[in-house]
Image (cartoon, helix red, strand yellow):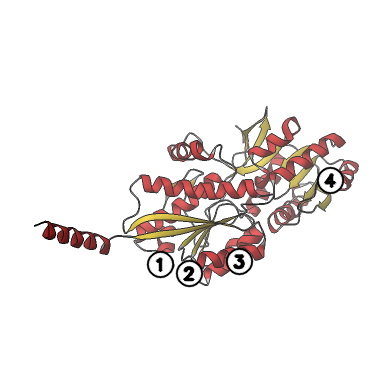
Amino acid sequence: MKRILFMACILMLAASTAFAGETLKMGSMSPLTGPYAADGNDIANGARTAIEVIKADGGIPGFDDITLSAQDTACDPRQAVAAANKLINEEVTGVVGAYCSSATLPASETLDEEDIVMLTPASTNEKVTERGLKNIFRTCGRDDDQSKAAIRFMTDYLKAKSIYLVDDKTAYSQGLADNVEKGSPAAGIKVLGHDHVNQGDKDFSAVLTKVKAANPDVFYVSLQNSATGALLIIQAKRMGIDAVYLAQDAVYHPQLIEIAKKDANGMYLTFGYVDTDAPSYQKFIKAYEPKYGKPGAYSAYAYDSAMAYLLAVKKAGSTDLAKVREALLSMEFDGASKKFKYMENGDSGSNYIIRQIKDGEYINFWNAQTGEKY
């Protein structure tokens, strides 16, 4: 009798194994080490949080587990391609990343060759979605839209007549600064100079001396990294540059305030509007903050990127690129960062506003769509 029961258990176990679901393998690509590690780890943690939330909500039919392989790109194009190849070998079907546009551009082509979906939470360079690739989707906004928001703020609110721009030569930072430079003359803003620094620089005195001599109404800071941005702001304030300081989304991070402290007070930044009272944001923050601390600039965008992919796989009932793409294009959902409806080219729209650092905190300051203060 015992033998019969034992054999029955074996058969039941074999049957359950035969119908067990597969593991849904996802990847993330971002700078986990080096000067951009704060944003990079925020991206990995945002993706992890989406997976944890989906699993807590019952998972995805057909899959018994969902995993994330987080790869380090260091914002280097060659390392990004190597990371993409590693994820291909690990048989992931969807990737959240990368951070720097210069890493996302080559890595997305490598993943496209293997029909792997890539959703970037942070790469704003226009070229990311202008190459006709079917596998790339963008959860954040675009540089050309961000530059228009900055120019409108300078003209309509600041009444600025002159600008001096500094970037750090990355595809993202220089592309954005170039857009602001090109759009300024038509808006009645004279470009007094456009200089460059190198990634990893610590001493900006040479460039800042030129900015001070030019005496612009607006000092436009377009850098890839918030820690570097903080150092530049500190040195600019100590040099006595008396201008309105306007920066962009990559400088937006809690560590900008932590490092620059009082020198950051009063500066403005362009960043996408996030309704922190929305139920979808509250669901994100309740899952994210206890485990990973305060979210960084791209935590919510990474969460939404991973969530979009997971919901699309659930809707499609498949990880096939064509079916997941069709599902992504058909979906509308309330994300943590904004309401989503991906367009044919993979973009999800921009909603840039102006934020200000006041008393050591980021506050919503000016709505670029309405031209009104918050």
Please provide percent x and percent y for residue 155: 73, 41
Query: Image height check: is 103 above or below 301?
Result: below
Residue at 54 percent across and 50 percent down: it is: 44
Mark 1 lies on residue: 320
Left or right of residue 282, residue 358 in this image: right
Task: Tell me the distance, in whole angstroms, between the alpha carbons under discs 2 and 3.
Answer: 15 Å
Q: Earlier in the sequence, mark 2 or mark 1?
A: 2
Coordinates of residue 201 in the picture (x, y in percent): 80, 50
Characterize the local packing of mark 3: few (<14), some (14-19) or many (20 or more) Cα atoms within 10 angstroms.
many
Any part of residue 265 in sight? no
Looking at the rendered structure, the kind of residue marked 1 is: Asp
Give amino acid for label 3: Val
The residue wearing badge 4 is 203
Q: Are marks 2 and 1 in contact (CB under 8 Å)?
A: yes
**Mark 2 or mark 3: whose residue is earlier in sequence:** 3
- As drawn, the label of residue 115 is 2
Q: Give the amino acid type for the residue marked by disc 4 in the picture.
A: Asp
Q: Amino acid at mark 2?
A: Asp
Q: Which quadrant: the C terminus? A: top right
Residue holding disc 3: 81
